[in-house]
Amino acid sequence: MEDKRKRARVQGAWAGPDMGSMASRSALASQVCGAHNLPGNSRQTRWGREMQFVFKEPTEVMRRVPEPRIIDKAGVYDLSITAAGISRLSLFPSFIDLKEADWMFEQLHREVPWSQKTNFRPDGFYQEPRLTAWYGELPYTYSRATMQPNPHWHPLLTMLKDRIEEITAYTFNSLLCNLYRNEKDSIDWHSDSEPSLRKSPVIASLSFGDTRTFQMRQKPGPEEHGDYTYVEQVHIPLDHGTLLLMEGATQEDWQHRVPKEYHAREARINLTFRTVFPEPGDMRQ
Ligand SMILES: O=C(O)CCC(=O)C(=O)O
C-alpha cells in the first residue's frame, strides 16, 4: 500500500538557457511557480550548453497527523458541524465535590452488582476487559450481547440521575455502569449508536475514582476509505466527580474509547446515563 506520508518528493527538471538568461528565468520561476534555483546545481551538456536544475515545490504536501486537542476546562465545546449536525460536548469538572465523590465511589464499588459481560464478534466470543452493570426497564444490546432489564435502581444512582437531569434539563431512563479495575481495563473505539438509542442520543457520563483519558476521534470522510490516520482527535482527562455530556451528532460523527494505560491506575467507575427506546424483540426478553 502506498504510504501517503512519503508522497512529498523533490520535483524539478534540467533546463537549458534558451528562454532568456539563466538569472531572469530563475527569478521568473521563483515568482511564478515557487521554484528555486539552487547554487551548485548547474552542469554542462556534451555540446557545451549550460543546464541548470530548477527545483519546484512539491505539488502534494506532506499530511500531518493532527495533535490531539486537550479538553480539560469547564465549558461547552462544538467539535464539528456536518450534515448530521453539531457534535457538542459539555464538561463539568467537580460536578460532585471531592468529599461526596469519595463516599459515592466506595458505595458504588461495593453495592453495584458488577459482572464481566461476554460479547460476540466475527472471530468468536470475548470477555470485556472491565466490569459492567445495567439499570433500566428495558434490555440493552451492544456487541451482539444483551443486558437484561434491571428496574432495581440503587438509591444513590437515582439521586445522581436526578441531579444530572436538573442541571442538563434532559431526562434519562437507563444507566450503563463501567468499572475499570486497574490500568489493564479499557473500552475500545466505538460510538453509542445502538438502534435502541435512536438518532442523536444524549449521553451523560459521570466519573469517580482514578483519572483515565477519554479519547475521541472523528469518523473519516468517504475519501479516506476507513483510514483514521489523519482524523481530528480529542483527549479529555475524566477525573473524580467530573460530568461529561455528549449531544447532537457526537455519536454519528465521532468515536470514543478509554485505552489501557502503561502506568498503574487505581479503580475507576463510570456511569453513562442514556435514554433507551423499546425495540421490536424486547417484549420476548
Ligand atoms: O468509561 C468511560 O468514560 C466511557 C464509557 C463508554 O464509552 C461507554 O459506556 O460506552
Image (tube, rainbow, N blue to C red):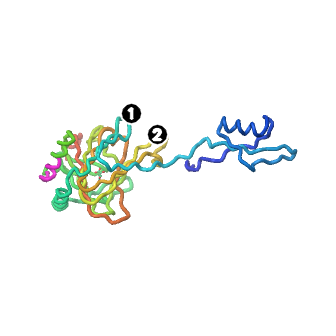
Nearer to me, 38 or 241: 38
Nearer to me, 138 or 241: 241
Type of the residue with mark 2: Pro
Note whether residue 146 is visible: no
Q: Residue at x 29, y 57 (%)?
A: 118
Q: Residue at x 63, y 47 (%)?
A: 9
Picture coordinates of residue 192, whole percent (x, y):
31, 45
According to the picture, the residue beneath numbered tag 2 turns out to be 222
Q: Mark 1: few, some, or many residues within 10 Å (few <14, many ≥20)? A: few
Q: Is residue 130 left or right of residue 109?
A: right
Question: Which quarter of the figure has residue 35?
Answer: top right
According to the picture, the residue beneath numbered tag 1 turns out to be 83
Type of the residue with mark 1: Ala
Give the extent of the magenta segment: 153-161
Q: CA distance from mark 2 to mark 1?
A: 14 Å
Picture coordinates of residue 39, whole percent (x, y):
73, 48
Residue 157 sits inside the magenta stretch: yes
Q: Secondary structure at mark 2?
A: helix
Q: Residue at x 47, y 47 (%)?
A: 230
* In the depicted structure, whether residue 277 falls above or below residue 130: above
Q: Is residue 170 left or right of residue 65?
A: left
Picture coordinates of residue 222, whole percent (x, y):
46, 39
| Numbered marks: total | 2
Nearer to me, 24 or 231: 24
Question: Which quarter of the figure has residue 32?
Answer: top right
Q: Secondary structure at mark 1?
A: loop
Residue 232 sits inside the magenta stretch: no
Picture coordinates of residue 47, whole percent (x, y):
87, 44
Note whether residue 74 is visible: yes
Between discs 2 and 1, the one toward the N terminus:
1
